[in-house]
Image: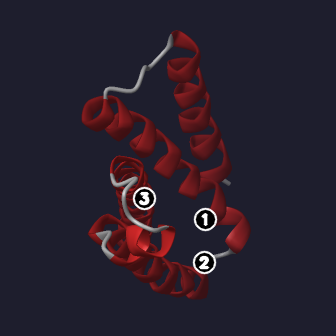
């Protein structure tokens, strides 16, 4: 159950980041709107807040089941998901340095999750 909740938390965090990026695109493409309306009319923004809110609730449950020092490093998997999603959804560049960083994160998560 712990790992399922952790996976849900990570997926929600990555989803929230993608939605916030979409929100920023909405804001930039609606320059005619006053700043407050750019947020009030922005469903991407609400989606991001919702994803982060649910992720927080799930995270609190995760913390009730495991040590913070054991599960917190696993949240860095969200960075990997965001980098890959940004590449596919927004066409953001993925360099060799980014790929090496992702490999280092994977090794780090593996090392910190084993006793």
Q: Which residue appears at 50% of the width and 20% of the height?
A: 99
How far apart are labels 1 and 3 at the CA level? 24 Å
Few, some or many residues within 10 Å of mark 3 (<14, 14–19, 20+): some
Give the residue number, with chain letter if any, for mark 2.
Answer: 66
Mark 1–mark 2 CB contact (< 8 Å): yes
Few, some or many residues within 10 Å of mark 2 (<14, 14–19, 20+): few
Judge whether residue 51 can be spotted in this image.
Answer: no
| Quarter where residue 55 is shown | bottom left
How far apart are labels 1 and 2 at the CA level? 7 Å
Residue 21 vs residue 59, the one in the foreground: 21
| Quarter where residue 38 is shown | bottom left
First in residue order: circle 1 vs circle 3: 3
First in residue order: circle 1 vs circle 2: 2
Q: Position of residue 72 (x, y in %)?
A: 64, 63
Q: Which residue appears at 35% of the width and 58% of the height?
A: 19
Question: Element under label 2?
Answer: loop
Give the residue number, with chain letter if any, for mark 3.
Answer: 20
Q: Which residue appears at 68% of the width and 54% of the height?
A: 115
Give the residue number, with chain letter if any, for mark 1.
Answer: 71
């Amino acid at each position: 159950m712990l790992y399922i909740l952790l996976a849900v938390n990570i997926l929600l965090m990555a989803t929230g980041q993608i939605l916030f990026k979409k929100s920023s695109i909405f804001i930039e493409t609606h320059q005619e709107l006053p700043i407050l309306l750019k947020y009030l009319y922005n469903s991407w923004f609400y989606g991001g807040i919702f994803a982060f809110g649910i992720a927080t609730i799930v995270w609190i449950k995760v913390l009730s089941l495991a040590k913070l020092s054991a599960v917190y490093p696993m949240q860095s998997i969200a960075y990997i998901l965001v980098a890959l999603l940004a590449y596919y959804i927004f066409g953001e560049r993925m360099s060799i340095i980014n790929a090496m960083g992702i490999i280092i994160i994977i090794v780090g998560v593996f090392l910190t999750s084993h006793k």
